[in-house]
C-alpha cells in the first residue's frame, strides 16, 4: 500500500519565498462556483434528506433547482458586485442546461473543467478510460471559445494517474488538493503542474449539508477566514477560494447572507485583496516562477 503520494514534498508555509500578487496585493480571493448535473434514478449526489425510494425525485429536483433558478440568482448578485468567478462546469451542462454555460462565458467568468457530470467519480477509472474522459470534457468545454486550463474532479475524486493525465492533456492547474494556502507545484510524469488552493472548509457543501449549519454561519466563516488571512498576509501571500453550489447558496433564503458578506468585503475596498480567478492565480505564479 502506498504510504506517500510523491506529488509534492513537505515545506512549511513559513519557509518559502515571499512575493506579491499583481499590484502589490497579498490575498488572492476568488469564487469557485460549481455548475453540476446529476443522473435521475441513480448515481452520486448530495442529499438534502435521506432518500427513501428510487427514483429519488426530492433530491434530484433540489439539485436541479440550482441550474434552473439558483445560478441565475447568483449571477444577479455577482453582476451587482462586479465579480468575475471561476465557473467549474460539468461538461454535461452544455447538453442538459442550454444557455447556462454560455451565460458564464458571456459574463466573463473563467471556464474551468469539472468532469463530465457529477453523478460519477473518476477515481476508480482505468487510465485509458480516464484519459478519454478528460479529452472529451476538454473538447466540449473548449467549444465555448477558450480551452480550459484548470480542473476540479467531481467529488474531488482522483486516481493515482489523474495529475499525470491532466498534465499530459495540457492542464495548467488542479483544484483537488486542499493542502495549502499558497499555490504549490505537483510532480507529474509530464512536468510540473500547479495545485491552486480550493477550500474544503469555506465550502457550502461541508458547511451546510454535512455540518447542518446555515447561511449566516457560512457567511461568518467567510468573514473570519478573510480576517485571519489578512492578518497574515504581510508575512506571506495567500489564497482563499470560496466554493459555492447554486443549489445550496442559490436558495432564496441563503443569498442575503452571502450578499451581505461579499458586499461588505467589496465595499471595504481593501488594497491588499486581489479579486481574481483561479486561472489568473495560476498564470501569475507560472509567469513569475513562484510556486514551490
Image (cartoon, rainbow, N blue to C red):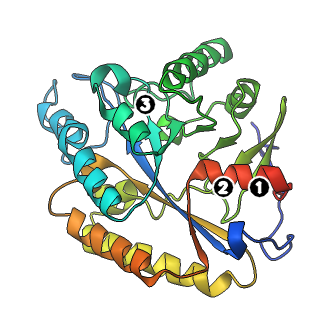
Q: Secondary structure at mark 3?
A: loop
Judge from the rendering whether residue 197 lies leftward or rightward of residue 209; answer left or right.
Answer: right
Question: Disc 1 vs disc 2: Cβ atoms closer than 8 Å?
Answer: yes
Of 11 and 271, nearer the camera is 271
Of 286 and 231, nearer the camera is 286
Height in image: 57 above or below 12?
above
Residue 168, by quadrant, is: top right
Please give the label number shown on residue 188: none
The residue singled out by tag 2 in the image is 281
User: How many other residues sit within 10 Å of disc 3, few (<14), some (14-19) or many (≥20)?
Assistant: many
The residue singled out by tag 1 in the image is 285
Dividing the image into 4 quarters, which one contains the C terminus? Answer: bottom right
Residue 104, by quadrant, is: top left
Marks 3 and 1, how far apart at CA: 26 Å
Instruction: Count numbered badges in the picture.
Output: 3
Height in image: 147 above or below 187?
above
Q: Secondary structure at mark 1?
A: helix
Q: Secondary structure at mark 2?
A: helix
Residue positioned 30% across, 51% down in the render: 75
Residue 17, by quadrant, is: bottom right
Rendered location of residue 204, percent (x, y): 36, 58
Residue positioned 29% across, 48% down in the render: 246
Marks 1 and 2, how far apart at CA: 6 Å
Dividing the image into 4 quarters, which one contains the N terminus? Answer: top right
Please give the label number shown on residue 90: 3
Rendered location of residue 25, percent (x, y): 67, 74
Judge from the rendering whether residue 28 lies leftward or rightward of residue 266; answer left or right.
Answer: right
Residue positioned 21% across, 36% down in the render: 64
Residue positioned 60% across, 28% down in the render: 147
Nearest-to-viewer mark from 3 and 1? 1
Q: Earlier along the polypeptide chain: callout 3 or callout 1? A: 3
Q: Earlier along the polypeptide chain: callout 2 or callout 3? A: 3
Amino acid at each position: 500500500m502506498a504510504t506517500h503520494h510523491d506529488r509534492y514534498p513537505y515545506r512549511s508555509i513559513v519557509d518559502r519565498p515571499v512575493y506579491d500578487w499583481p499590484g502589490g496585493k497579498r490575498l488572492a480571493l476568488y469564487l469557485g462556483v460549481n455548475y453540476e448535473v446529476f443522473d435521475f434514478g441513480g448515481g452520486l449526489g448530495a442529499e438534502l434528506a435521506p432518500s427513501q425510494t428510487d427514483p429519488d425525485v426530492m433530491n434530484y429536483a433540489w439539485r436541479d433547482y440550482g441550474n434552473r433558478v439558483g445560478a441565475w440568482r447568483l449571477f444577479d448578485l455577482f453582476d451587482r458586485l462586479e465579480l468575475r468567478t471561476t465557473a467549474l462546469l460539468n461538461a454535461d451542462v452544455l447538453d442538459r442546461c442550454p444557455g447556462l454555460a454560455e451565460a458564464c462565458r458571456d459574463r466573463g467568468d473563467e471556464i474551468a473543467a469539472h468532469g463530465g457530470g457529477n453523478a460519477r467519480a473518476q477515481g476508480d477509472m482505468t487510465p485509458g478510460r480516464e484519459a478519454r474522459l478528460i479529452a472529451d470534457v476538454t473538447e466540449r468545454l473548449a467549444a465555448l471559445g477558450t480551452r480550459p486550463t484548470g480542473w476540479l474532479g467531481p467529488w474531488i475524486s482522483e486516481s493515482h494517474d489523474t495529475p499525470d493525465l491532466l498534465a499530459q492533456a495540457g492542464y495548467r492547474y488542479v483544484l483537488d488538493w486542499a493542502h495549502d494556502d499558497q499555490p504549490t507545484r505537483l510532480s507529474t510524469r509530464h512536468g510540473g503542474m500547479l495545485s491552486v488552493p480550493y477550500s474544503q472548509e469555506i465550502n457550502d457543501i461541508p458547511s451546510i449539508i454535512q455540518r447542518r449549519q446555515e447561511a449566516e454561519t457560512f457567511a461568518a466563516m467567510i468573514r473570519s477566514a478573510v480576517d485571519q488571512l489578512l492578518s497574515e498576509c504581510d508575512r506571506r501571500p495567500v489564497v482563499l477560494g470560496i466554493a459555492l453550489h447554486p443549489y445550496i447558496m442559490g436558495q432564496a433564503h441563503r443569498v442575503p447572507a452571502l450578499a451581505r458578506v461579499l458586499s461588505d468585503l467589496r465595499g471595504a475596498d481593501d488594497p491588499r485583496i486581489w479579486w481574481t480567478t483561479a486561472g489568473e492565480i495560476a498564470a501569475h505564479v507560472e509567469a513569475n516562477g513562484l510556486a514551490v
